[in-house]
Amino acid sequence: ILIGEGALAEARAHLEGWVAGRTVFLLSTSNVLALHGAALEPLAAAAARWIVLTVPDGEAAKTVATAEGLWREMAGAGGKRDSRLIAFGGGSAGDLGGFVAGCFLRGIACVQMPTTLLAQVDAAIGGKTAVDLPEGKNAVGLFRHPEMVVAETGFLATLAREELRAGLVEAIKMAALLDVGLLARIEEDLEPLLAGDPAVLAPVAAAAAAAKIGVVERDPEEGGERRLLNFGHTLGHAIEAAAGYTGPGSLRHGEAVAYGILFALRLAVRRGLPPAAAARLTGLLARLGLPPLPPLAADDLLARLGRDKKAREAGLAWVLPRALGDGRIATDVERGELAAELPRFLADPFAVPVR
């Protein structure tokens, strides 16, 4: 995993050897190709064949129908077991690309080249790949670790403030549970981070990625400790799906996760998290200037939680920190507690939780 300014240049010699003599499928979006496609021209020249697979932006790309269309296009182009796939774009392109590569001909080699902050610090690392179903986000997928992750932070200069904000939520999630020093750095440098200042953005991205890498190396398939990285995702995924992945009122993944963290803090305070720690995280998330929650029904969110892909037969586990830097898995959250708390949360999501 290479991350930082110049990561793509550092990886170039290795990648040119990796694509040499191969059919290479480049999965990306029109927007990313227009902004950054020229950076991959040396790789295209080194490949035997370079086939561009263009997909929609955002979560709209992550459907079974899109995956089937890509598999058929790859088969029609004569793709082989030793062909290559490069996922070049944000988290959705990476999720879809990894899934498509992992299933095509029972699996072809893939490289992740994330171009958004969210993907560089989180989505591209760890081998989680998936597409969505109407019943839930990331409901069909597999663990498929890429050959390499090349996170060129120079690409982040083209991101809008909203995209940087969404990525910073994932960095905050990692920092709150795994690196309190990083959390303090984000608090201090929040404005230049949101402005895309490369001098502060690159080291924060690298530190957040390093925190995730450490967990994934110890628990590559989410059997234990890695479940902590779902902090904020339990309700966050339900909010994201209920709001719709595209169109008016929809939320970016990181924005939905921020609201999921705010809700988890309410449950965590009841189980021992000091209110001052909850207030600190609530205040930091409030400074991001998140878009307001669209109209959501507590009953609908409760039903969606019951279909969450992270649920086990024994029920749904929640990531609820006991302190900053000390994440825990809680399995004692009853449906009645959720049903009582959700309406209060939807009415005032930034209320600081108290015991």
Image: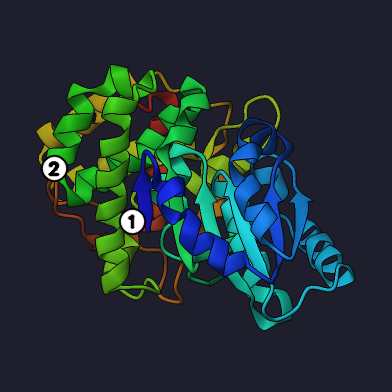
- Res. 234 in view: no
What residue is pinned by disc 1? 229
Of pointers 2 and 1, the one earlier in the residue sequence: 2
**Which quadrant of the structure image shows residue 254?**
top left
Q: Secondary structure at mark 1?
A: helix
Q: Position of residue 283 (x, y in %)?
A: 24, 24
What residue is pinned by disc 2? 180
Q: Position of residue 128 (x, y in %)?
A: 49, 64
Q: Position of residue 65 (x, y in %)?
A: 81, 59
Does 180 sit above or below residue 113?
A: above
Disc 1 marks a residue whose amino acid type is: Leu
Residue found at x 69% / y 73%: 83
The label shown at residue 21 is none
Residue found at x 22% / y 23%: 189
Residue found at x 64% / y 38%: 38
Q: Secondary structure at mark 2?
A: helix
**25, 275: nearer the viewer:** 25
Graded by Cα atoms within 10 Å as few (under 14), some (14 to 19) or many (20 or more), the crowding at tag 2 reads some
308 left or right of 83?
left
Q: In which quadrant is the N terminus drawn?
A: bottom left
**36, 287: nearer the viewer:** 36
**316, 140: nearer the viewer:** 140
Q: Do residues under tags 2 and 1 come within 8 Å of each other at their CB atoms?
A: no
Q: Position of residue 113 (x, y in %)?
A: 52, 51
Graded by Cα atoms within 10 Å as few (under 14), some (14 to 19) or many (20 or more), the crowding at tag 1 reads many
Q: Residue furthest right?
A: 76
- Res. 100 in view: yes
How far apart are labels 2 and 1 at the CA level? 15 Å
Image mark count:
2
